[in-house]
Every structure is written in structure tokens, then in C-alpha cells.
Amino acid sequence: LPSLAPHSLWLYGERDRIVPVTTAAAVAALLPDAAVACLPKAGHAPFLSHGAALGTLIRDWAHEQRR
């Protein structure tokens, strides 16, 4: 993970049973410059169940990267 570009966004679903949200802490420790976000009540495919919220997170993160 440390070899990845620091400008990355790691999204987690609170109810994901494939990639548990608890891995977010490990990612944050390994990539301190990366953004980590959790979608409440979302599972492994938040783009299906929480599309609007996911879109907002990605849009806001992308706008922040342009600053």
C-alpha cells in the first residue's frame, strides 16, 4: 500500500461483510495522506444501494484534490 499515490480515496460500507470497515484503520495507518470514508448502512456495493451518497463523497473528494 505505501507505494500507491497519496491522492487516493478508500471507501467502505459500514455493513460490508467482504471487506470489513475495520480495515480502514490499517489503510489510514499505511497511507496517512489518503482519504478514508465510511458509508453508514452500506454493504459491499454502495454504488448500488447508496449511489447518491457515494457520488457526493467522490465529488467532494475530487473537488478537494483540485485545490
Image (cartoon, rainbow, N blue to C red):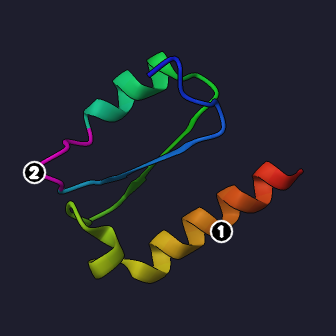
User: Is residue 48 rendered to the left or right of residue 61?
Assistant: left
Q: Which residue is mark 1?
A: 59
**Three-letter code for the amino acid on which mark 1 is drawn:** Arg
Tell me residue 23's x, y (percent): 28, 31
In front of the other: 40 or 50 = 50
Write down the quadrant of residue 21 in the picture. top left
Instruction: Determine crowd level at label 1: few under 14, some 14-19, many 20+ residues with C-alpha closer than 10 A.
Output: few
Q: Which residue is mark 2?
A: 17
Q: Residue at x 29, y 80 (%)?
A: 48
User: Is 18 contained in the magenta span?
Assistant: yes
Report the quarter where the N terminus lies: top left
**Three-letter code for the amino acid on which mark 2 is drawn:** Arg
Magenta part of the protein: which range?
A: 16-21
Dot 1 falls on a residue whose secondary structure is helix
User: Is 59 contained in the magenta span?
Assistant: no
Q: Residue at x 19, y 44 (%)?
A: 19
Dot 2 falls on a residue whose secondary structure is loop
Instruction: Determine crowd level at label 2: few under 14, some 14-19, many 20+ residues with C-alpha closer than 10 A.
Output: few
